[in-house]
Amino acid sequence: MWVGIAAPSREQKDGRIASRSCAILSLMLLRRFKPGDIAACLDVFDSNVPVFFTLPERAEFESYLRNLPGPQWVVEYNRRVVGCAGWAVSAQRAHVANLCWGMVDRAWHRQGLGRELLRVRLRDIAQDTRIDAIEMNTSQHTFRFYEREGFAVVSIENDAFAPGLHRYDMNLDCTPSWRASCAGLMVSSTLPEVSDQG
């Protein structure tokens, strides 16, 4: 499916986007992950080290991508993957869904891509009638984002990921009213979906 997003200006500094000001309205492609996306998703991960992830987590993320436990999405801009995220039914509790490894390239933060990746996952989960709760963990840098989307903090562990990088466990109850609201939950675009093949 296509997503209308305002792209950051293309001013460059040391090969990276220097400004996040909105310059043009671009169409992003939100699609299912393919095995050929692994290297690009690792690049997205690398752009977020060390503030949002730690380098030792990279091997765990790569193993996850090579052995996906559930659906995985990516978002493209000009045929380049700039974000990815997944979810899976808990191996221990079939009524719980876990959000997995959501991230956006550091240069594309605060452009709305994280919200699109979250919404498409919530729409997926809402259609699975086995699920009555969603669980996830994140850090102090992003838990407010998930709070705005209805998640609640259930525990905090300081320095859990690394010194100064704290773990926030969060959940969201899949109540009938929440599921009903998700029935109409769409990502920003009203354009038709496109094939995930190719």
Image (tube, grey):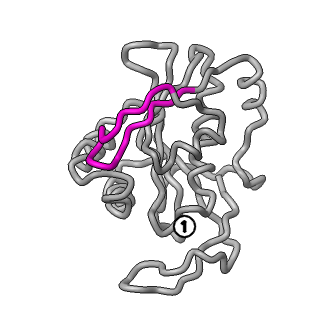
Give the extent of the magenta segment: 154-171
Within 10 Å of the Cα at label 1, are there few (<14), some (14-19), or many (20+) other Cα atoms? some
Q: Position of residue 82 (x, y in %)?
A: 48, 62
Label 1 residue SS: strand
Residue 129 horizontal/vertical position (percent):
62, 16
Q: Residue at x 32, y 59 (%)?
A: 49
State which quadrant residue 126 falls in: top right
- The three-letter code of the residue at mark 1 reads Tyr
Residue 60 percent coordinates (x, y)? 25, 42
Query: Which residue is painted at 60% across and 21% down in the image?
Result: 128
Residue 16 in the image: state x and y as whole percent.
Answer: 42, 79
Instruction: Indicate left or right for 63 with 86 as reference.
Output: left
Query: Which residue lies at the image location 64% right of the left edge and 21% below the top edge?
Result: 174
Which residue is label 1 attached to?
77
Asked if the stretch drawn in magenta spans residue 124, the answer is no
On screen, residue 190 above or below 120: below
Rendered position, 66 above or below 132: below
Determine if the magenta segment contains residue 166.
yes
